[in-house]
Image (cartoon, coloured by chain):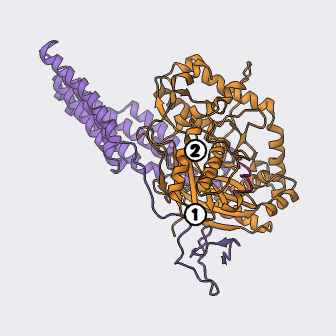
Amino acid sequence: MSYCVNCGVELDKDAARCPLCQTPVVNPVCPVDTTIPPNFPVERREVEPVNRRELALLLTAMLGCAGGCCVLLNVLFWWREMPWSAIVAGACAMLWVWTVVPLLLRRVPSLVLVGLDLLAVAGFLYLIALAVDGLDWLVRLALPIWFGCGVVLLFLWYILPRRSILSRCMLILGGCVVLMLWLELCIDLFLGSYQPMWSIVVAAVGLTLVLPLLVIRYRPDLRREVRRRFHF
Amino acid sequence: MGRRGGHDKGWFQLDNAAMMYSAIQSGNYSAVYRFSAVMTKEVDTQALQRAIDRTLPRFPGFHVKIRKGVFWYYFEPDDSPGPFLQKDIQNPCQPVYFQNKDQLIRFFYYRHRISMEVFHALADGGGALVLFKTLLAVYLRELGEEIPNQEGILDVEEAPDPQEWEDAYARYTRKRVRLGRSDPKAYPCTGTPEPFYTLNVTMGFVSVQALRQVAKGHGASITEYLAAVLIQSILARQRREGRRRELPVALAIPINLRPYFPSRTLRNFILTVRPSIDPELGDYTLEEIISQVHHHMRLHINRQEMQGVITRNVFFQRFLPLQLIPVPVKNFVVDLAYRLAGNRPYSTTYTNPGAFRVPKEMEPHIQHMEVVLGQSYAPRVNCASISYGDTMEITFAGTVKETDVERDFFRTLVRDGLHVKVTSNRRE
């Protein structure tokens, strides 16, 4: 029999390493016996996991029914002159992308799924614009705002998980500032000329919060002091 | 056994603990535990299958299907053939999938080892051990041995006793309910998760006599001593992580209620106690941890306090607005409540079903006993132990890659002068 030199426990005759600390067994008097059957079976079994395709199918059927019925009602009975069902069907399609696609594409990175969700939103906006004859505001207002929100969201989605709490706060605040500046720019250009006002106030407040956080983040003494004062 | 329980209609209600286990059972939580007996001879599979077929009719509460009603799950007798003996697998205690109509009780064999896995909604360890002991006796009789019906072995020729299937929680409920306070969050003791469907099992074998002497030297019982060593190992792990603020380390230790509230039930009848150590108060030596665990258990394991907890649990089960919630919503609520009240305040679980006693005619045929707990929500190890003869078997099982908790645990036993033999199903 062999003992682990680190843990002091007796090991199986066929153990080549200690299962507790992974120290290899080197015992010239009693070498590892690989001929005896192992103490535990080697065959693994995996229970069939919950079938997410069934849930995806159920959601698809529900959303498809809702969208399809509205289109039929629109075409056959109510307000035939106005394509209101396009908005409902578009909403169903957007919900389908948000809920069913993550169930079907389980190995795809979440960043790609968020990108798909954003594309679904763009598609929905396009359908609304078509239904209410508003391609003008779509191109000049809605899509630029969508673009700004999308870029900030994707950036934060990518960068936040690997950051400390301080960095996250700074990045979220910074993202909000950029978004507000972009929002006012889009609205002002849509209405006439760019005259920045409220977004500058938001940006000033945001930067006043971000800059101290930035200093705290990169000055170890300050960081320790803040931790001491604000510990919880 | 009232009309409300549905026993006269061929179905029966889940007890209080079973409701929780059936609600929280999922792909990443396995409310399944396993008892194994390692025999002195290789398993005769045909004799064992015959023994299963003869034994199960005596235990109708184990041969059931779980069905989903509108407001609750319920059990229905399983008329299908089986359960059938299966070859053992490397990753035991796999979750039960209700949708797949999985068996709630499974039997396995591997060389000298006979294993039985039970879904916790059916019975607690005390009840399952009665079935397992009776099964081993019937198996040995099939091999030609004379085994008397002693030491808790039931006569399989007798008709099932309805008292063995009573909901003992409901029987010992008081009229006045006192709502308890929630326990604080404990150190979660999680590690790197293994790929799906892995359960790492590490077993240690210690002499019961030697262990008792060591525990006695510390002024504690074996359970208290092992629980204290486990707490110390988890405290050391938390210290190594270098957390800015250390959380209390708390164990969930199931207590068999039958000695305190007489009942012959084989279904669930357990509650948990929660010994804990808060490292924010300062460093504790092993002696001090043992003392804390010892006094905590003596203080809190009493009839009145436990009856209060039973009453509170059953009150929620019988509260009409909660009863009227449909099963899918109820599952979600119970699952959330379990995560907050049943998982969050505990670092891990340690269970010790005690000594496995058999008639002396059976003793030469069994080498030792083993017990394994299924995987938790979080990737962490659970600890369980069972003794047979002079062998105490201690199992660490979990879906975590690291081995530091069990390593420190067994090293402490070695430092206390105990001889420990370790074996594992981990692949190198």
Q: Secondary structure at mark 2?
A: helix
**Residue at position x 85%, y 61% from top?**
B213
Mark 1 sits on what residue?
Answer: B112
Secondary structure at badge 1 equals loop
Residue range highlighted in magenta: B352-361
Q: Is residue B246 shown above or below B58?
A: below
- Does the rendering let one see residue A200? yes
Residue type at the position of mark 2: Thr
Q: Main secondary structure of the magenta part?
A: loop
- Which chain did the image draw in purple? A
Instruction: Tell me the residue at 68%/29% (across/down).
Output: B169
List x then y, in percent, for residue A56: 31, 37
Left-right relation of A73 to B314: left
Going 73% across and 36% down the picture, which residue do you hit? B257
Picture residue at 53% right of the left edge, 55% below the top:
B47
- Gap in angstroms between the C-alphas marked 2 and 1: 20 Å
Residue that badge 2 annotates: B55
User: Does the stretch in magenta take in B94?
Assistant: no
Whole-percent x, y for residue B38 in the image: 62, 60
What number is the disc on residue A83? none
Colour given to chain B in the rendered image? orange
Q: Nearer the viewer, mark 2 or mark 1?
A: 2
Q: Please state the horizontal and vertical placement of residue B231, each as a whole percent of the image.
A: 72, 53
Query: Residue reaching furthest bottom?
Result: A28
- Indicate whether A79 appears above or below B236: above
Amino acid carrying mark 1 in the image? His
* Pick the front one: B402 or B3: B3
